[in-house]
Amino acid sequence: MLKIKIAKRRDGFALDAQFEVPTPGVVALFGRSGCGKTTAVNIISGLLAADSAYIELNGHVLTDTTAGIAIPPEQRRIGYVFQDGRLFPHMSVLRNLEYGLERTRASQLTHGTLSARGSSAGLASRLAITVDQIVSLLGLEQLLRRQPYQLSGGERQRVSLGRALLSQPALLLLDEPLAALDAARREEVLPYLERLRDNLSIPMVYVSHQFEEVLQLATHVVLMDAGHVVAQGPLSQVSLVPQLRAIVGPDSVGAVVDGVVTSVDASCGMAVISVGSGLLNVSVPRVSVGDRVRVQLLARDIILATEEPRGLSVRNQLRGVITSVVDDEDDARLVTVDVGGCNVLSRVTRGAVEALSLQSGSSVWVLVKAVSTRGHAFRLGSG
Amino acid sequence: MHLTPAELDALRLSLSVAARSVLFSLPFAILIAWLLTRGRFAGRWLLDALVHLPLVLPPVAVGYVLLLLFGHKGPIGGWLETHVGIQLAFSTAGAALATAVMAFPLMVRSIRLALENVDPGLEAAARTLGAKPLDRFVTITLPLIVPGVIAGAVTAFAAGLGEFGAVITFASNIPGITRTIPLALYTAIQSPGGDDQALRLAVMSFALGLIGLLLAELLARRARQRVGR
């Protein structure tokens, strides 16, 4: 468990955030630029002092301003991947990778491999992160002898990730690690982040203002706005909160559902996943039966019907009950439908709401075109 | 060009005085430059001003202050003589001290400039990787300022070869002990028939200065290349 409660005032800006997330897992600190995400991770890392703070990781208090506890960053065992990489320019890639590793090793020799703190935090078991493992996980084989200035932006971020991981962190902070990269480079690095999430059980705090990255990586989301936490929880829950619309834009609003693949049609990249009590045909490439898959069902693509429709090309028809109808922009309404233990959002016009008399408690059919789903394989916790 | 034994002495002395002054003052210059860039303490402006004072004072005045402090009867000089057995005034070591004080601001400026160019974010990154303060300084900061340190040291060395006022005031003009090239040049100009010798010494000064500056540039360029800038 990662427990955070921080407050900091800085000319004209106040950060006052509190959240609790399970570990391991990837928690996304999501919000617009300037909402205090980076300040928050700097405080968690110990690099920045807060006016008041309580930070606890897996039962260990790292900062407690009321008790006067403030473990210095160099002893926190918190890895930090900065937006600009911050590779040491005078060292080769290999020496960059080894920098944190050597220091962790040295401190373990002096304090004993199984210090009370280390063992109970479960750190001893993580010593297994070796240079070889990182090099193959992040595909760094060809880069080891190069100097940082000879690397592309994407390669630099991969090395930076490896360097942070090799310091055997109990927590990894990533401050918009892809923000400085162009779209192509981002696509190059994202799969590596997914591999890290799925292969190493290191809790991560991932700062981002790109919903696409959150969708692809996060297990939990802390939604921030103007220095405050407006929502937190699993992405499937946070994806339903109305405050998200102002941040991601109306066209990106949509319920995120996690499901397990029950069958696959590899020839057309389609898969059937079980969601709540129903089944959903979705377009997700490269998955196999049993995989966990995450799909976003965009609210604007979801059609509601009050009677069972027939003769439609739409592959997915789910039975559900409306739980809420709220105002969206202009003449639109955002309808939340519970389809057997899982919620989806649909954006419909005010006219449609009135004509079909849609209201809380109404029984409806939810229609989802399979090809309009944006899916990501999400293998956390399974094979 | 044929050099007389006296001229060779002056050359040897100049090199030795300049080298000693640089070696002695380099660690202090790095420390002071670091304090001036990263330090947060009251009186920083005073330290800054003190370090730069030799740039604007008449060198003779600096030599005189040194004489008052480090001379035979000075508070520091007297203590050194009785307790350590070192006499600075009128000695080669004294000439090196005077030279060091005069060249100190040059060195501090160059190192300070290099320090200001080091991204503090790199030190923060080293911190999150478990490096303690001294470790960070030695493994990150110092290697990154090497070009500035080299440039500062070589410039100070080249300037030190030619220090006149402070040396002659504090260490006097003793052949073979404190008569460096500029002092020998001055003596030659003052003596009847010393024109030839004066010219040779002047040419020597020019050559040494030029070599020093070129060397500084070359070394700094090479050091910069290592970090790809």
Image (spheres, coloured by chain):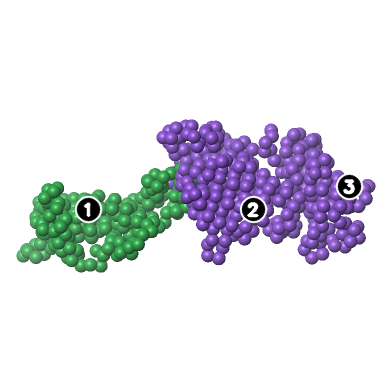
Chain colours: A purple, B green
Amino acid at the residue labelled 1: Ser
Q: A11 or B175: which is nearer to us?
A: A11
On the image, the x and y values in percent for residue B25 come to 25, 53
Whether label 3 touches label 1, CB < 8 Å: no
- Determine whether, in the image, residue A1 is placed left or right of residue A257: left
Q: Residue at x 14, y 55 (%)?
A: B77
Q: For mark 2, what is the residue? A: A30
**Helix, strand or loop under label 2:** strand
- The local crowd at label 1, few if under 14, some if 14 to 19, many if 20 or more residues have their Cα within 10 Å, is many
* Residue B142 placement, left or right of A19: left
Q: Residue furthest front?
A: A67
Q: Are marks 2 and 1 on the same chain?
A: no
* Amino acid type, residue under disc 3 in the picture: Ser
The picture places residue A8, in percent across and down from the top left corner, at 54, 58
Residues at discs 3 and 1 both on one chain = no
**Where, quadrant-wise, is the C terminus of chain A in this rendering?**
top right
Residue B21 shows which numbered tag? 1
SS at mark 1 in the image:
helix
Give the distance between the C-alpha atoms of the residues marked 2 and 1, in whole angstroms.
57 Å
Residue B130's place in the image compared with B166, above or below, is above
The tag on residue A313 is 3
Instruction: Name the amino acid type tagged 2.
Output: Phe
Q: Which chain is disc 2 placed on?
A: A
**Nearest-to-viewer mark from 2 and 1:** 2
Say whether disc 2 or disc 3 marks the residue closer to the N-terminus: 2
Residue plotted at (30% across, 64% down): B46
Residue A79 in view: no
The residue located at (64%, 55%) in the rendering is: A229
| Quarter of the figure that contains the N terminus of chain A | top right
Subunit of label 3: A
